[in-house]
Image (cartoon, rainbow, N blue to C red):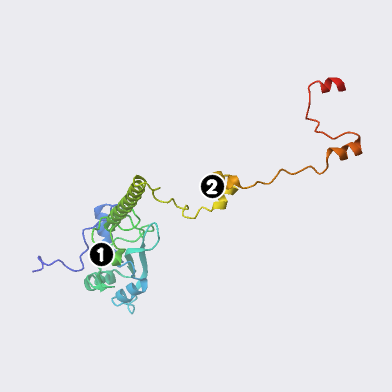
Amino acid sequence: MSHILEPLDAPSSYRDSRSHSSKHEQQQALRQTCTLYLGNLSFYTTEEQIYEVFGRVASVSSGGGIKRIIMGLDRNTKTPCGFAFVEFYTHAEAVDCMRYVSGTKVDERVIRCDLDPGYKEGRQYGRGRSGGQVRDEYRQEYDAGRGGWGHNRLREEEGRKRMEAEQARRTEREQLYQEGTAGMDAGGGGMVPMGGEFVYEEMEGDARGHGGEREAKEGWEDKPRATKRERSYDDDEDEELYGKSEKNPRFRDHDDQDADDA
């Protein structure tokens, strides 16, 4: 039966594609590693929860224990994106976690553990085009623990909503245009433009000089108009004061008057 059942502490066949080590070097590193890779984590799982679960396998009395926990982060938002690295002090502790902890539930999610050749700075960031993990780029199902829809599916949903909103606006504009056209065909003025729903006051037409038609309709042309303002003094007073009547210098009675004065 040993050749049928795969051992629980055996590492997976996954290899880091960005690593420059050969296959033999990676296998040798896995035989000595003290680092675990954790996958399928919820975005809301904390370091304290991981320490609580994996700390039960650690052998603190024999000099072991958890050295550090590195949370995987979205490259753009710097928020957890569903994976982590756990470093122990001994290789045996990492193997025991593979044997006893992998496949258990954390935050109602079945987590998976795998031996890792060793953490290097920069590996804590997601490698997906959107900043998270690659698996979340192509995920089609809705997963509330991992941000909802996958990034590609989310872009499709956002595009579909934009098209629906644009179609709704276009339909509304066409409906308004048809209603306005129908009102004009019926002899009306169509729909009142925005801002034109206020009453046009009669005195506003007078103030703008458009009161002639209303005056003609109401018979205002028969009413007496105010006379022109009279002069403040007459020609007799001018004669008495100045010896002659004051006239407008621009006014000429005869063209020959200038010649006589000259």
Q: How far is mark 2 from mark 1, CA to CA?
A: 93 Å
Q: Which mark is residue 158?
A: none
> Visible in this render: residue 208?
no
> Visible in this render: residue 23?
yes
Secondary structure at badge 2 equals helix
At which x and y percent is residue 257? 83, 23
| Dot in front, 2 or 1 | 2
Residue 58 or residue 129, whichever sits in front: 129
The residue that label 2 is drawn on is 214
Marks 2 and 1 in Cβ contact (< 8 Å): no
At which x and y percent is residue 36? 29, 66
Using residue 107 as the reference point, say whether residue 225 is left or right of it: right
| Other residues around mark 2 within 10 Å, as few (<14) / some (14–19) / many (≥20) | few
Residue 34 or residue 43, whichever sits in front: 43
Secondary structure at badge 1 equals strand
Find the residue positioned furthest to the front. Answer: 222
Residue 30 picture quarter? bottom left
Find the residue positioned furthest to the bottom. Answer: 61
Residue 216 or residue 222, whichever sits in front: 222
Residue 54 picture quarter? bottom left
At which x and y percent is residue 141? 23, 61
Residue 115 or residue 28, whichever sits in front: 115
Q: Residue 114 carries which label?
A: 1
Name the amino acid, label 2. Arg
Is 46 drawn above or below residue 210 in the view shown? Answer: below
Using residue 148 as the reference point, say whether residue 202 is left or right of it: right
- Tell how many labels: 2
Q: Which residue does the image show at 39% across and 57% down from the upper left?
A: 76
At which x and y percent is residue 27? 24, 58
Q: Earlier in the sequence, mark 2 or mark 1?
A: 1
Name the amino acid, label 1. Asp
